Amino acid sequence: MRVLGIDPGLTRCGIGIVEGAVGRPLAMVGVGVILTPSDTALESRLLELDRSINEWVSLFNPDVIAVERVFAQHNVRTVMG
């Protein structure tokens, strides 16, 4: 099974692919960070994230996608960065 994992972030979005099977250790297939400049318009940044994630999906053909839940403890602004 091949899993695409996403650690969401508007400025830095972590992305990685692991592959494994029952009884075998996981293997890292790919890892990266999608960067979008903070001085760029929000819609352009979101489009870049969409384009980049779709590129990873097309390139690695994952069986499932897992996205880390976004949460804020004290400072909601840190979630947006």
Image (cartoon, rainbow, N blue to C red):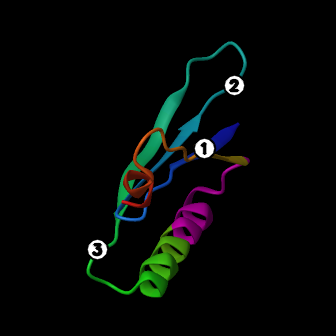
Determine which residue is flagged by label 3: 38
Which residue reaches farthest front? 74
Marks 2 and 1 sit apart, C-alpha to C-alpha, by 25 Å
Q: Earlier in the sequence, mark 3 or mark 1?
A: 3
Disc on the earlier residue, 3 or 2: 2
Residue type pointed to by label 3: Ser
Q: Which stretch appears magenta?
A: 53-63
- Residue 65 in the image: above or below residue 58: above
Residue type at tag 2:
Ala
Q: Which residue is mark 1?
A: 69
Q: Give the alpha-carbon distance from disc 3 to disc 2, as whole Å.
A: 39 Å
Amino acid type of disc 1?
Arg
- Confirm or deny contact between disc 2 and disc 1 (CB under 8 A): no
> How far apart are labels 3 and 1 at the CA level?
22 Å
Identify the mark nearer the N-term, 2 or 1.
Answer: 2
Other-residue count near label 1 (Cα within 10 Å), few / some / many at <14 / 14–19 / ≥20? few
**Helix, strand or loop under label 1:** loop
Q: Which residue matches tag 2? A: 21
Q: Quadrant of residue 58?
A: bottom right
Identify the residue at image location x=31%, y=84%: 40
Q: How many marks?
A: 3
Residue 21, image x and y in percent? 69, 25
Report the residue at 61% width, 62% height from top: 57
